[in-house]
Image (cartoon, rainbow, N blue to C red):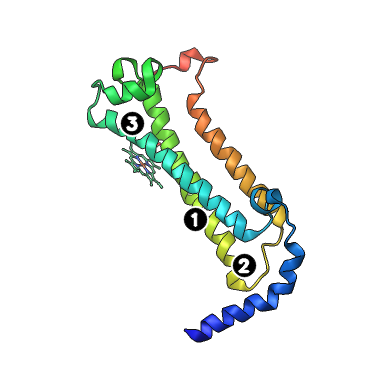
Amino acid sequence: MSAIAHEEHGHHEAHGHHDHEHHEEHFVSKYIFSHDHKMIGKQFLITAVFMGVVAMLLSILFRIQLAWPGESSDFLSFFLGETWAPNGVLKEDMYLGLVTIHGTIMVFFLLTGGLSGTFSNLLIPLQVGARDMASGFLNMLSFWFFLISSVLMFVSLFVENKRFPDLDWV
Ligand code: HEM
């Protein structure tokens, strides 16, 4: 145990001098548009956990309707209003939208982003003894596309079909 503690201590000291050169790093380049695999891993983790909570909240809405099919719910009426839950009953297309966005967010923005985005970024460079991923810039872009696409996926829930009304078959 003390050997490990010793080693870690030594490790820090060995890099101490290098760290000084990076100390003036700006907040934005350190936490927001970071090229560092460890920070990017954390960004993926935070986004994935947040999206998991969003998808869980969506599941509560449609699961309530599924438990009492066709019945009115004050909860749904309160949170979704007349537009999406007239008289407290989920509109059919809103039900389908909620299930679909729930499943898609869970799979792509919790599982895929959360697991591979977080753990491959965080662990692989450490496991193979590399300083970082091959391209920090692309790695950063990868997170930002992930974040933008997760927002787009969520807001697509509110897009209505006005262009092809014939397709409103539900
Ligand atoms: C928070 C707890 C969760 C609840 C209460 C919940 C509830 C549900 C329910 C009731 C359905 C079926 C709805 C229907 O067919 O009418 C569903 C579908 C689905 N769920 Fe969840 N779920 C939860 C968490 C998760 C998680 C953690 C994942 C994956 C990581 C997930 C992925 C999916 C997928 C892929 C579908 C199918 C979506 C579709 O048919 O378009 N869910 N969920």
**Rendered-image quarter of ligand 1:** top left
Q: Is residue 60 above or below residue 25?
A: above
Sequence-first tag of 2 and 3: 3
Mark 3 vs ligand 1: CB below 8 Å: yes
- Badge 1, how many Cα within 10 Å: few under 14, some, many 20+? some
On screen, residue 58 above or below 125: above
Q: Along the horizontal axis of the image, is 31 left or right of 83?
A: right
Q: Secondary structure at mark 3?
A: helix
Badge 2 is on which residue? 125
Q: Position of residue 116 (x, y in %)?
A: 53, 56
Residue 100 x, y percent position in the rendering: 42, 34
* Disc 3 crowd, CA 10 A, few/some/many (<14, 14-19, 20+): some
Q: Give the x, y percent position of residue 101.
A: 45, 35
| Quarter of the figure with residue 58 | top left
Secondary element under disc 1, as helix, strand or loop, is: helix
| Among the two numbered marks 3 and 1 on one chain, the one whose residue lies closer to the N terminus | 3
Say what secondary structure mark 2 lies in: helix
- Separation of marks 1 and 2 at Cα, in angstroms: 15 Å
Residue 148 drawn above or below residue 116: above
Distance (Cα) linking label 2 and label 3: 41 Å
Kindly identify the residue that appears in the image at 73 percent across and 56 percent down: 25
| Residue located 62% across and 67% down the image | 125
Crowd class of label 2 (few under 14; some 14 to 19; many from 20; radius 10 Å):
some
Q: Is residue 143 visible?
A: yes
Task: Give the residue pinned by disc 3.
Answer: 62
For residue 12, side relative to residue 42 (left or right): right
Residue type at tag 3: Phe
Q: Is residue 103 visible?
A: no
Query: Looking at the rendering, which quadrant does residue 170 occupy?
Result: top left
Q: Amino acid at mark 1?
A: Leu
**Separation (CA) of disc 3 from disc 1:** 26 Å
Q: Which mark is residue 115?
A: 1
